[in-house]
């Protein structure tokens, strides 16, 4: 009786759509991709926030070093003694270059580049997440 | 391509500035005893471990005026000998033009000039600053002309 019932069930059961397997696999891939994108969004969000936070102290270091090296003092000569400065522009340009604080500039540029890079990947991933969802 | 060119220009500028600073620092330490009456062996031992000094610009306090030479205490308390030449060096305070005799010890000045082989600087422009900066040349807001 039970065997007959099972046979009838198997014989009369509806056929799954032919593209079901493909649909399931593509959904699994989409979910996997979405999971990866979410992970990247978290990583780049943290990166963007950290680099944004690092910009302010780096900028402060740069400002202090610029003042300590006399960069502002030398550059102010451009406004007070333009005629003399333009006559000896090579010495003036070199004095400005010498007064540039390399470490401060590296710190600020590194922080700004890290922030812009994180922001770029973050926007790309958010866009991808919205398309995939 | 533009980034590469910018990188090359910056690299070249860095090399040029670095070599100028190194050359001036070398001349300064070799001629220290001549310029500042120090020990014969010079002060190279005290210079070790420090960064090269600026060759084309000084800002600091006058510690000695001697004929057409002045000695300026600049960044990191390093003294530098500056030569003032009549007709070539412009000395300014506010809008008035000064003579070397108007320069006094303890005046804060900014100098643009050309380094020579004797470890001195031939001044082109000297601007006397209005007042003593609150934190000195090592830090603080820096000196601003009138």
Image (cartoon, rainbow, N blue to C red):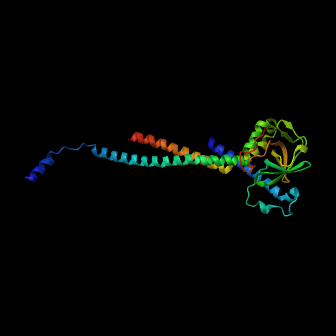
Where on the picture, by quarter, is residue B130? Answer: top right
**Left or right: residue A119 compared with residue B33:** left
| Coordinates of residue B97 in the picture (x, y in percent) | 87, 38
Please determine whether, in this image, residue A3 is positioned above or below residue A122: below
**Left or right: residue B88 compared with residue B50:** right
| Coordinates of residue A18 in the picture (x, y in percent) | 26, 43
**Rendered residue at 31%/44% (across/down):** A23
Q: Nearer the viewer, residue A49 or B144?
A: B144
User: Can the viewer see residue A105?
Assistant: no
Where on the picture, by quarter, is residue B5? Answer: top right
Q: Nearer the viewer, residue B2 or B101?
A: B101
**Rendered residue at 39%/41% (across/down):** A132
| Coordinates of residue A51 in the picture (x, y in percent) | 55, 48
User: Can the viewer see residue B61?
Assistant: yes
**Left or right: residue A120 compared with residue B141:** left
Q: Nearer the viewer, residue B101 or B2?
A: B101
Quarter of the image where the C terminus of chain A is located = top left
Number of marks drawn: 0
């Amino acid at each position: 009786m039970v065997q007959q019932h099972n046979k009838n069930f198997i014989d009369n059961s509806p056929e799954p759509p032919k593209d079901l397997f493909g649909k399931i696999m593509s959904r699994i891939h989409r979910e996997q991709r979405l999971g990866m994108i979410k992970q990247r969004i978290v990583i780049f969000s943290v990166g963007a926030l950290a680099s944004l936070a690092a910009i302010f102290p780096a900028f402060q270091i740069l400002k202090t070093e610029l003042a300590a090296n006399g960069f502002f003092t030398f550059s102010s000569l451009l406004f007070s003694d333009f005629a003399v400065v333009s006559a000896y522009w090579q010495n003036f340009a070199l004095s400005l270059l010498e007064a540039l604080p390399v470490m401060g500039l590296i710190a600020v540029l590194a922080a700004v580049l890290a922030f812009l890079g994180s922001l770029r990947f973050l926007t790309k991933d958010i866009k991808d997440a919205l398309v995939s969802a | 391509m533009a980034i590469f060119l910018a990188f090359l220009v910056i690299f070249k500028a860095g090399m040029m500035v670095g070599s100028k600073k190194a050359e001036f620092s070398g001349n300064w330490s070799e001629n220290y005893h001549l310029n500042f009456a120090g020990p014969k062996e010079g002060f190279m031992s005290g210079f070790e471990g420090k960064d090269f000094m600026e060759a084309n610009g000084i800002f600091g306090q006058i510690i000695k005026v001697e004929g057409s030479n002045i000695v300026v205490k600049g960044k990191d308390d390093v003294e530098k000998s500056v030569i003032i030449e009549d007709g070539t060096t412009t000395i300014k305070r506010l809008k008035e033009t000064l003579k070397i005799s108007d320069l006094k010890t303890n005046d804060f000045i900014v100098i643009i000039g050309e380094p020579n082989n004797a470890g001195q600087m031939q001044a082109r422009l000297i601007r006397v600053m209005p007042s003593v900066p609150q934190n000195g040349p090592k830090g603080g807001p820096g000196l601003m002309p009138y």
